[in-house]
Image (spheres, helix red, strand yellow):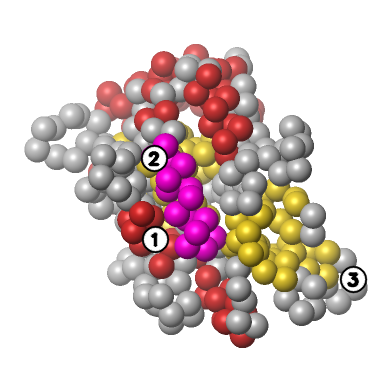
Amino acid sequence: MDKADFAHIINSKWARNKFARRVVSAAKRYGWQGVQFRCHHVLSAESKGNFTAFLAELSNLFPKKPDECPFAISLRIPAWELNIEHFYDVPSLNRLDSIVLEPFQQRYRNAEVVSPMFTMDHNDKQWAVDKTMKRWIRSGVQPSALILQIPSYGVSYSKNASGTWVTTFMSRTPMCPILGKFKAQPKLFYDAVTAYFMTPDGSFITYEGELTVDYRVRYAQREGLGGVGIFTLNSDDHDGEACGRGVYPILHAPTSFVVENSSEVVTGFVCSRSVQRCATQVEIDIEYLKFWKIPDGGWREIEQVDELSVIPCT
């Protein structure tokens, strides 16, 4: 869906309401208990008011029942968008269940770093988690509404057969045996708070280790954020054989560092304070338009539903 198609929906009260009702219908049909929208690429300053109205309409369509887990509505916003107030009504953002900082890549020396915590080499043009979080908070976003995502995947930066440097995303399943083969001792990019390893052939692999997960969780606690999430479950070691640390080691790692009176730490593809006890949330991704779910812990594509793209998690 491009900006023109999105504008056609969001700027028409009738089409906007129809879209909201389709989300509700799908949520009831499949038993979702939360949705997360990834649609910043089609938003504009002109659509700000109507998008705010859409979120309010969607929220009103879900009745609040005291004996049931509340339905959660959240947004995923890219780190490079520092001027968040230009595209979103900040008071309305604070009424959402959560605002998730979308993971991103940043080049550093001969490596690709996923979601560096701080700018590297003191380069103010680089994106960093802390830089974006602080800017959003200065714009009026409540820290307790913000969710920091921890990438479960690694990134390999290596030369291909033609000598061209290429970036490859690696799940834990192929990555852990490589680290084990070379008996890799993790080193750290300290500003990025990312572990890395260089293979004998000169490839750089960056990834999250126990120390970096520990720091990211403590950062969320220190800054009073709403919690942390894992991005994504299907990149973690789902059967526990590749990394030898049990099933979903990255998913379970944050809970090892939670201290008393800390901010809530919620793990899962989508993380949310108020739906911590709930079973399923989904992401509505305006760009990719696919429909997924997790049956018995696995992933498979089951169908495409109009223009809704949903990637659920438990």
Q: Nearer the viewer, residue 309 or 298?
A: 298
Counting from the top left corner in percent of width and height, residue 130 is at 57, 36
Callout in the foreground (1, 3): 1
For the point 66% across and 55% down, the residue is: 189
| Left or right, residue 159 beside residue 52 | right
Q: Label 1 is placed on what type of residue?
A: Ala
In the displayed structure, 55 sits above or below 233; it is above
Q: Earlier in the sequence, mark 1 or mark 2?
A: 2
Q: Residue 163 carries which label?
A: 3
- At label 2, counting other C-alpha atoms closer than 10 Å, the crowd grade (few under 14, some 14-19, many 20 or more) is many
Cα distance in 3D space between marks 3 and 2:
44 Å
- Disc 1 secondary structure class: loop
Residue 6 visible in the picture? no
In the displayed structure, 289 sits above or below 245; it is above
Q: Label 3 is placed on what type of residue?
A: Gly
Which residue is under mark 1?
253
In the displayed structure, 242 sits above or below 295; it is below
Q: Earlier in the sequence, mark 3 or mark 2?
A: 3
Q: State yes or no: residue 213 in magenta.
A: yes
- At label 3, counting other C-alpha atoms closer than 10 Å, the crowd grade (few under 14, some 14-19, many 20 or more) is few
Q: Pick out the residue farthest to the right.
A: 162
Q: Pick out the residue farthest to the bottom.
A: 181
Counting from the top left corner in percent of width and height, residue 119 is at 68, 40
In the image, the segment drawn in magenta is 208-222
- At label 1, counting other C-alpha atoms closer than 10 Å, the crowd grade (few under 14, some 14-19, many 20 or more) is some
For the point 59% across and 51% down, the residue is: 193
Quadrant where the C terminus sits is bottom left
Q: Which mark is residue 270?
A: none
Q: Pick out the residue farthest to the left.
A: 67
Q: Label 2 is placed on what type of residue?
A: Gln
Which residue is under mark 2?
221
- Disc 3 secondary structure class: loop
